[in-house]
Image (cartoon, rainbow, N blue to C red):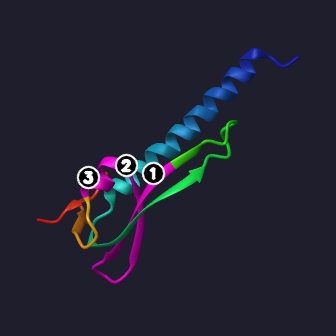
Amino acid sequence: MINPLIIFAGAVVFFIVILSLIIVSIQKRKKEVWKGRLEDKKVITETRRNDEYNRKVDVYYLFIKLENGTNKKMSVNKKLYESFSIGDEIEKKEGMYDPVKSE
């Protein structure tokens, strides 16, 4: 029989690793700085295969042409998605998680 303390320790380590990955991802996105033009936006229904029910989830994507000529695809929440129109000039400022319309 496996010692419950070992199972608990493994769960704690797993939780710390996942939490660390989430924090690093958020910090990376907050450090990004760019300006661009919204070229397209789409709602794509994706299936969450890790879910025992195989739920379908709407994911809101913005497709941005950056000032340096490269393309960027980013997922955003529904409210932010609906606040942008194709052709909007948008920018992502350092320290902010989401882009905003350029002033």
Residue highlighted by disc 3: 95
**Under tag 1, what secondary structure?**
helix
Tell whether 6 sits left or right of 40.
Answer: right
Question: Which of 63/45 is in front?
Answer: 45
- Mark 1 or mark 2, which is nearer the start of the sequence? 1
Which residue is labeled 2 in the image?
77
Q: Which mark is residue 93?
A: none
Residue 17 placement: quadrant: top right
Residue at the limit of the structure toward the bottom, as seen here: 69
Closest to the observer: 69 or 28?
A: 69
Depicted 102 relative to depicted 79: above or below: below
Q: Quadrant of the C terminus?
A: bottom left
Which of the marked residues, 2 or 3, is nearer the chain's N terminus?
A: 2
Q: Which of label 2 and label 1 is nearer to you?
A: 2
Q: Where is residue 25? Give x, y as percent.
A: 45, 51
Mark 1: amino acid:
Ser
Spatial separation of the CA atoms under disc 2 and disc 1? 16 Å
Range of residues picked out in magenta: 58-83
- Element under disc 3: loop
Q: Quadrant of residue 2?
A: top right
Quarter of the image for the N terminus: give it. Answer: top right
Occupied quadrant, residue 14: top right
Task: For marks 2 and 3, give the CA distance.
Answer: 18 Å
Disc 2 packing (10 Å; few <14; some 14–19; many ≥20)? few
Instruction: Determine the CA span between mark 3 and mark 1.
Output: 13 Å
Residue closest to the far right? 1
Residue nearest the viewer, comparing 76 with 95: 76
Residue 80 picture location, percent across and down: 29, 52
Q: Look at mark 1 in the image and give the residue it sits on.
A: 25
- Cβ atoms under marks 2 and 3 closer than 8 Å: no
